[in-house]
Amino acid sequence: MKKVPFTKADVEKWTNTYPTPFYIYDEEGIRKCVTDLYKAFSWNEGFCEYFAVKALPNPSILRLLNELGCGADCASEPEIVLAQRSGITGKKIMFSSNETTKREYEIAINAGAIINLDDLTHIEFLEKLGPLPDTMCCRYNPGKFRNTNDIMGHLYDSKFGMTYEQIKVAFKTLKDKGVKHFGIHAMLASCCLEEDYYPRLAEELFELVLEMKHDFDISVEFIDLSGGIGIPYKPDAQPVDIFEIGDGVRKVYERMIEDNGMKLSLYTEMGRYITGPYGYLVSTCVHYKHIYKEYIGLDSSCCDLMRPAMYGSYHHITVLGKEDAPFVGKFDVVGSLCENNDKFAVDRKLPKVDIGDYLVIHDAGAHGHAMGYNYNGKLRCAELLMNKDKEVKLIRRAQTMEDYFITLDIDPQFK
Ligand SMILES: *Cc1c(COP(=O)(O)O)cnc(C)c1O
């Protein structure tokens, strides 16, 4: 069963200061997750997790992750600035962008970030901006993932990365142009719950490492396994065993890298795995509606959490105070947008829900608040951080009407 690390009484207390809807993140959960990740890869000297900022772009979270040794994976100017202002600087920033503008590259180079090139043509594009950085990473798209299973098909349709032929040309060209330190990056899966994904990806990338050595005498110094490790959204799914994953990668590393007298650092760029399970969207039931189906109406909407509406994703829901109550039927749990896909859950078995009950949506800590938007004039909700003593701190206030209208301040007639 999925558990919520706070009670109805806790939320009643918090709502005196912070009305629903709000996001709340469990600091201890994130700490333990990152600590275990570092333990699982402690056999690799240079291991670093570059947290994918897009998953949860909040400075309080980034400072916590920085304290735990993480870097930041960024893809835009605001993400770079957010990382820097949270204390993550220089090579602790991985710039894994695509369709990158000139300005974004300039910002990334000035920040001293590691540039992860998405395409061969970007070498020429970068050169126009000045000398190439000493360290460069290239993003690989093998087209198909060997020994693959179904989840990781469709790489031919993926806009990311360079082909096998291109990445070899890229490394040779970069070397000829004086680049000294090299890395390889690939992200071939999303929300993968299989422990052998990273080991198989590592094997694929280590093969390329050996070829670079053989063909161009390039010693690749780091491999970025990127994100893609999944979390169990459904109550019957099992979380991945990060120690088994670390051990699986270690075996491939020993066989392919160590036994060939080589050495390199491993990086990850996880987002979902690090914060996903430790974030909750807390809403209040404001209406109950019975027509052809039964509807539970919340004070939040898919502007707060887009995943169910966008991907049809399952997010578990707990009615606080009724954790052990029996199910009484199936309900659609809906938000207030004038869009019929604004449903957090469809035909969900739930206990009897009363108006005023708090509904907690699980696994909202990654790609949750971050994907929020203002459609239908919905204002973005607040974010709270809960420590181990269940004390909460406001880490982003809710948007106000003033915030909503701010970009219209250029219109003198609009007051
Ligand atoms: C989104 C993304 C990640 C993080 O993915 P998760 O599935 O959240 O772990 C990492 N790297 C890149 C380049 C991404 O675009």
Image: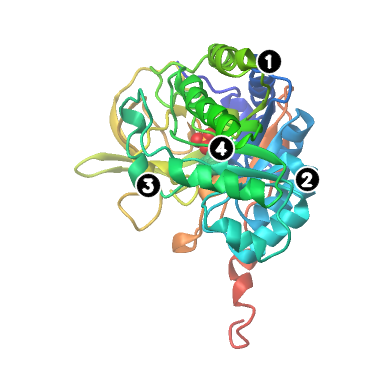
Above or below, comparing residue 116 to residue 329 in the picture: below
* Residue picked out by circle 4: 185
Between 197 and 32, the one nearer to me in the picture: 197
Q: Residue 165 vs residue 260: left or right?
A: left
Q: Residue 154 vs residue 40: left or right?
A: left
Classify the position of the N terminus by image quarter. Answer: top left
* Residue picked out by circle 3: 310
Which residue sits furthest left?
A: 292
* Residue picked out by circle 1: 39
Q: What residue type is labelled 1?
A: Lys
Residue 16 x %, y %: 67, 40
Q: Which residue is drawn at 35% across and 22% down?
A: 147
Residue 5 x %, y %: 60, 22
Query: Can residue 275 be seen at all in this image of the molecule?
Result: yes
Q: Which of marks 2 and 3 is in front?
A: 2
Q: Which amino acid does label 2 sit on?
A: Gly
Q: Which of marks 4 and 1 is nearer the N terminus?
A: 1
Label 4 crowd bin: few (<14), some (14–19), many (20+), radius 10 Å: many
* Residue picked out by circle 2: 90
Image quadrant of residue 64?
top right
Residue 219 x %, y %: 66, 32
Q: Nearer the viewer, mark 3 or mark 4?
A: 4
Q: Which amino acid does label 3 sit on?
A: Met
Q: Which of marks 2 and 3 is nearer the N terminus?
A: 2
Q: Which of marks 3 and 4 is nearer the N terminus?
A: 4
Q: Earlier in the sequence, mark 3 or mark 1?
A: 1
Q: What residue type is labelled 4?
A: His
Above or below, comparing residue 145 to residue 369 in the picture: above
Q: Which of marks 2 and 4 is nearer the N terminus?
A: 2
